């Protein structure tokens, strides 16, 4: 594992690779262990991902002998006939002869710490779940932000164009870091993350007293609480959308208990946001991973933000909707072009979102200045900000540092292969 605290490499280091070689390389990351087809395997992590990997790897002929997990409440239990073994005991039993596959992939998990921990216990071969994804892509991919590395090379020109239009060095380093973990599985010591408030980065935008905030994916009101602190209660209107009924109930409880002076300026809706009006299936989980999904048991009403055009002029739009961000932006084309609000859009829920969403934002309104900021372990909680020039606090304090950025943004909008859906 390489150290990700080093400066990210030049884009050509990743995107200039031979496409055919990269197609073959992914499978080699999950190489045979000793003389057995894939060796014995222990899954470290007995949660939902671990169960998914057990089912898929077993069908592929991989011998999964046990689970291990740091949660002692799970020790001694069985998952599909496999015992959940404490880490120290698992290392003693299997550490020399088995591969330990880290079956954890979430925003709180630091892979490098887990890797070092298992090696310290005596495990001789520790690999990431991404290696299994790459070895059996038809079974596991895409999975959240993960897809085969060579997909990036196939889109090299678009990636380079987006990179050239990012507005500061911090954004460009985050972009390169995305390539780093996707191409080479570099989960070394975690690089610095933004210490500023997510969706309210005071180095990029300053609060205005007449903010009209649209919160797409309001969850239980965490963003609302941050907004009230950031604005100090001085705002014009707050409109929140949260389609998960359980999350919406918690959001309601928060709003009901606010002072009337705040409550009367806040509206909440149990609707989803998409590209058009539709009744859609929704996977109600009751946590941050609830999302639009054809397998969902709940039916929700989805609306486009453009339907608000004429009676609501937002100054900020935030989107954290578990992969629905691209469609939601398509449904907000007119309101974005007409009012040019600050955009704060999550770009880590789908493999291509960290470049297709900045690309779309720039196409909808070339005047936007694009920033990337990350608020958790790589690759989670990565947000793209589209900041109009009149709201760009960073540019007001220093010269915009990408050269003739306006020409670059015009180039992004007219780049071959990029077509405006509207």
Image: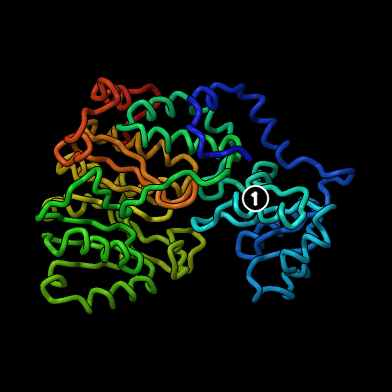
Please count the marks in the image.
1
Kindly identify the residue that appears in the image at 30 percent across and 32 percent down.
167
Residue 105 visible (yes or no): yes
Residue 58 visible (yes or no): no
On screen, residue 260 above or below 345: below
On screen, residue 138 above or below 73: above
Q: Quadrant of the C terminus?
A: top left
Label 1 residue SS: helix
Kindly identify the residue that appears in the image at 37 percent across and 36 percent down.
171
Image coords of residue 118 (percent x, y): 70, 55
Image coords of residue 271 (percent x, y): 31, 64
- Residue closest to the eye, 242 or 110: 110
In this view, the residue farthest toward the front is 120
Kindly identify the residue that appears in the image at 46 percent across and 33 percent down.
176
When asked about the image quadrant of residue 30, the answer is: top right
Classify 10 Å Cα crowding around label 1: few (below 14), some (14-19), many (20 and above).
Answer: many
When asked about the image quadrant of residue 19, the answer is: top right
- Residue closest to the eye, 19 or 393: 393
In this view, the residue farthest toward the right is 35
Q: Name the side, left or right, on which 147 lies relative to 359.
A: right
Kindly identify the residue that appears in the image at 31 percent across and 45 percent down.
329
Q: Which residue is mark 1?
A: 129
- Residue closest to the eye, 342 or 184: 184
On screen, residue 76 above or below 279: below
On screen, residue 159 above or below 332: above
Q: Quadrant of the N terminus?
A: top right
Coloring scheme used: rainbow
Image coords of residue 153 (percent x, y): 54, 27
Q: Name the side, left or right, on which 157 lies relative to 61.
A: left
Image coords of residue 373 (percent x, y): 36, 44
């Amino acid at each position: 594992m390489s150290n990700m605290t080093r400066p990210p490499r030049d884009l050509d280091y990743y995107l200039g690779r031979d496409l055919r070689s990269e197609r073959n390389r992914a499978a080699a990351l999950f190489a045979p262990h000793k003389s057995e087809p894939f060796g014995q395997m222990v899954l470290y992590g007995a949660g939902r991902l671990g169960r998914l990997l057990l089912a898929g790897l077993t069908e592929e002929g991989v011998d999964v002998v046990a689970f291990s997990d740091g949660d002692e409440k799970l020790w001694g239990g069985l998952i599909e006939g496999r015992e959940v073994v404490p880490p120290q005991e698992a290392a003693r039993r299997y550490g020399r002869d088995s591969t330990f596959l880290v079956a954890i992939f979430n925003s709180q998990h630091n892979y490098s710490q887990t890797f070092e921990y298992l090696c310290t216990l005596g495990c001789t071969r520790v690999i990431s779940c991404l290696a299994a994804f790459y070895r059996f892509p038809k079974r596991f991919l895409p999975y959240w932000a993960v897809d085969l590395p060579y997909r990036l090379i196939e889109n090299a020109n678009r990636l380079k164009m987006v990179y050239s239009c990012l507005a500061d060095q911090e954004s460009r380093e985050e972009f390169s870091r995305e390539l780093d973990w996707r191409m080479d599985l570099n989960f070394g010591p975690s690089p610095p993350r933004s210490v500023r408030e997510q969706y309210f980065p005071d180095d990029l935008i300053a609060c205005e007293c007449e903010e009209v905030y649209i919160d797409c994916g309001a969850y239980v009101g965490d963003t609302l609480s941050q907004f009230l602190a950031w604005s100090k209660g001085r705002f014009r209107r707050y409109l929140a959308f949260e389609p998960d009924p359980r999350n919406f109930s918690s959001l309601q409880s928060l709003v009901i208990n606010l002072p009337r002076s705040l409550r009367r300026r806040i509206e909440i809706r149990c609707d989803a946001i998409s590209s058009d009006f539709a009744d859609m299936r929704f996977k109600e989980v009751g946590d941050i991973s609830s999302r639009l999904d054809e397998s969902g048991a709940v039916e929700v009403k989805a609306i486009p933000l453009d339907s608000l055009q004429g009676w609501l002029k937002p100054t900020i739009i935030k989107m954290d909707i578990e992969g629905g961000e691209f469609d939601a932006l398509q449904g907000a084309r007119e309101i974005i072009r007409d009012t040019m609000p600050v955009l704060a859009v999550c770009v880590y829920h789908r493999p291509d979102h960290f470049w297709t969403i900045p690309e779309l934002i720039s196409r909808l309104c070339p005047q936007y200045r694009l920033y990337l900021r990350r608020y958790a372990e790589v690759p989670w909680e990565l947000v793209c900000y589209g900041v109009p020039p009149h709201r760009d606090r960073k540019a007001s304090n220093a010269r915009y540092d990408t050269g003739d950025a306006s020409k670059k943004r015009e180039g992004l909008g007219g780049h071959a292969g990029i077509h405006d859906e509207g």
